[in-house]
Structures are given as C-alpha cells and as structure tokens.
Amino acid sequence: MKRAHNQNVLRLNSDLEIPEHKAPAVLDDLDRALIEIQQEDPFFSFNEVAEKWGVTSATVRNRI
C-alpha cells in the first residue's frame, strides 16, 4: 500500500496572527552552512568559517 507524500505533512489553519517574536526565522545559505558545520564539529573555529564565507567572526557568532 503506497501512501501519498502529502499525508505526512501537518498543516495548521488558524485565523490567529502569530506575534513577530514567534514567527519562523528565514534561513539563508550561511545559516544552513553553520548548522551543517556545527553538526559535523561542534568545536569549529568561528574565524575559519568567517574567512571562508567572507564575513566577520562576529557575524558567525551572532548567527550561532
């Protein structure tokens, strides 16, 4: 018996507005890369990642 792919997705419908501080964050490529790097090595160097991505180490630290 084959199940349709969309049966595994929970969709919530509501007329309530979500407060801004509870709205989902939009992730960009750097955010996704940081998540992957953290999963591989939780003790990675912020400076090395910053150099690779062309951002400051403060940017990496703030994203984490």
Image: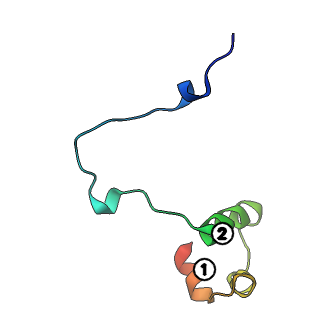
In the picture, the disc for residue 34 is 2
Residue at coordinates 24% horizontally, 50% vertically from top-left? 17
The mark nearer the N terminus, 1 or 2, is 2
| Location of mark 1 (residue) | 60
The N terminus lies in quadrant: top right
Q: Quadrant of residue 40?
A: bottom right
Assign a secondary structure to mark 2.
helix
As measured in the structure, the alpha-carbon distance from the residue carrying label 1 to the one carrying label 2 is: 8 Å
- Give the crowd class for mark 1: few <14, some 14-19, many >=20 residues within 10 Å: some
Q: Neighbour class for label 2 at 10 Å: few (<14), some, many (≥20)?
A: some
- Residue 44 location (% of width, % of height): 74, 75
- Pinpoint residue 63: horizontal percent, then vertical percent: 54, 74
Q: Pinpoint residue 29: horizontal percent, then vertical percent.
A: 63, 68
Amino acid bearing label 2 = Leu
Image point (63%, 18%), residue name: 3
Looking at the rendered structure, the kind of residue marked 1 is Val
User: Where 61 falls versus 5 (above or below)?
Assistant: below
Tell me if label 1 and label 2 are in contact, CB under 8 Å: yes
Q: Residue furthest top?
A: 1
Q: Residue at x 76, y 66 (%)?
A: 41
> Circle 1 — which element?
helix
